[in-house]
Amino acid sequence: MGAFFKKYRYFFLFFFLLCVGIMIMFYNALAWRKTLPVYTPSMVNPELVDTLIQHQANKQKHRIAPFKFVNQNGDTITNKDYEETIYVADFFFTTCTTICPIMGDNMVWLQNQIKDMPNVKLLSHTVTPDIDSVPVLKAYAEHKGVLDAKWNLVTGNKKDIYYLARQSYLAVKTGSVDEMYDMVHTENFILVDRKGRIRGFYDGTNLDTPDKESKNVKQLLEDIKWLDTHESK
């Protein structure tokens, strides 16, 4: 018997390696691979999208447009500050007493999770810039424990904020037909990748409660880590 195996040892070795190779191929073919979609306006609720871009379906075309605002410290913040960065954007206002306090607390939680991730930041836009001046945003930031290096709270021209929300982030509803720049912000946290593309929408009022209709903030953190690890610059 030993002589038989010795005689055909190369055949058995080849057969063994072939079987291993086939098993690896089947495993790779059947294994679940995490992916994140690249969102376009045509994939989003039409209520949240400006009619000018509503039917845009080119995944490579839709990116967050250039912007220029002022943050809680009076510093000018532009899209250049977020280049090659994964970031989470949202829309809020400091006097909101409904969903904003919950969103703010969940954003603080997220900030504490990503504070040691150099390629990840947060960006919150006020939808009432006439109320949320730099001093107001600063007081809010201090109350929330905002880390300036990780999280910018920005204010600016209302028209600019509106257009960015509707044409780039696909994140707010029109509040009134009569008032073009009246906005009703949503609970959405928007995940943006290093290339300025939208990769996910998450319920900013939902930290970890299972929800069949939307992703929660803990899922957002998982997706941030996945993007940071699997998608290069």
Image: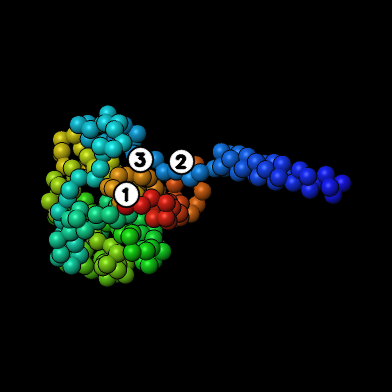
At x 58% / y 40%, what residue is drawn? 25
Q: Is residue 153 left or right of residue 13?
A: left
C-alpha gap between disc 1 and disc 3: 9 Å
Label disc, if present, on residue 16 of the rendered structure:
none
Q: Is residue 133 above or below residue 34?
A: below
Q: Residues within 10 Å of mark 2 (few under 14, many from 20)?
A: few
Residue bearing the label numbered 2? 213
Percent from the top left, x then y, of residue 229?
A: 42, 55
Q: Residue at x 39, y 48 (%)?
A: 202
Q: How many numbered discs sit on the rendered protein?
A: 3
**Whole-percent x, y for residue 191 in the image:** 34, 49
Q: Is residue 10 left or right of residue 76?
A: right
Residue 37 placement: quadrant: top left
Question: Between 144 and 149, which is closer to the camera in this rendering?
Answer: 149
Residue 29 in sight in this render: yes
Q: Amino acid at mark 3?
A: Val
Note whether residue 92 is visible: no
Residue under pointer 3: 38
